[in-house]
Image (spheres, rainbow, N blue to C red):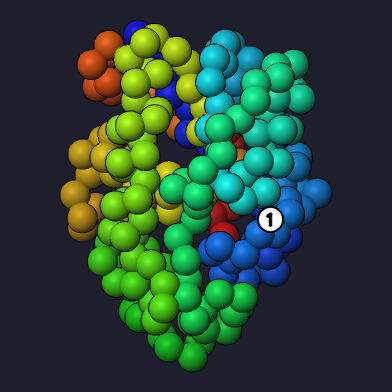
Amino acid sequence: MAHLILVRHGESEWNAKGLWTGWTDVNLSENGREEAKKAGEALKDIHLDVAFTSALKRAQQTLEEIQGVLGTNLEPIADKALNERSYGDFTGKNKWEVKEQIGEEEFQKIRRSWDYPPANGESLKMVYERVLPYYQSEIEPKIKEGKNVIIAAHGNSLRALIKYLENISDEEITKLELPTGGLYVYELDGEGNVTAKEIRGTNTNTH
């Protein structure tokens, strides 16, 4: 049995402004660093063996804060396969202003749907198609060895992975939201199958 811990990065400077961030490499806000520290406090009962992050510094900074709380010093494995989805032409735009312009229905399709990419951007399905092969080739083997793994990444790259782990339908995945600094803690067996799940932390800010 091994633990797989998924943590969404803490609030970034662009989250705080309501901007679609995607692949833009921005820092955590001070509030985001506090959210990451709280995530660390919620993980004190689990020994970490391996750490993965995206190639973006808001995820890496989140892991740094968590490790600071836990007193661990794992060298993270960073890969762009775990990056946030690209929002294409909407990158850098204010979400709520866009919502006013295009209406609730179109806004929710862009923000949450499975297979609806914004212009020059990625759908969640496209993110899934890069996250899953990386998980199966690089992360899952370590879990099958019994190692406890933490992944610090993003709302959509983690939604894609959760869809796979929990066998969530294309329709139901639209309802899943992860708060900044949010934690999903799974127990997996030697075959990589989920045997238990716990959502930790109390933050409800989904930005």
> How many marks overall?
1
Residue 183, relative to residue 188: is it above or below? below
Q: Residue at x 41, y 78 (%)?
A: 120
Image spot of residue 6 (x, y percent): 48, 34
Q: Is residue 38 visible?
A: no
- Classify mark 1: residues with Cα within 10 Å, few (<14), some (14-19) or many (20+): many
Q: Residue at x 61, y 30 (%)?
A: 76
Foreground of the two, 137 or 184: 137
Of the 4 image quadrants, the one containing the N terminus is top left
Residue 112, relative to residue 200: is it above or below? below
**Image quadrant in which you'd find residue 185:** top left
12 lies left or right of 2: right
Image spot of residue 55 (x, y percent): 58, 48
Q: Residue at x 30, y 41 (%)?
A: 133
Residue receiving disc 1: 12
188 lies left or right of 33: left
91 lies left or right of 2: right
Instruction: Assign a secondary structure to mark 1.
Output: loop
Residue 144, relative to residue 98: is it above or below? above
Q: Residue at x 44, y 48 (%)?
A: 81
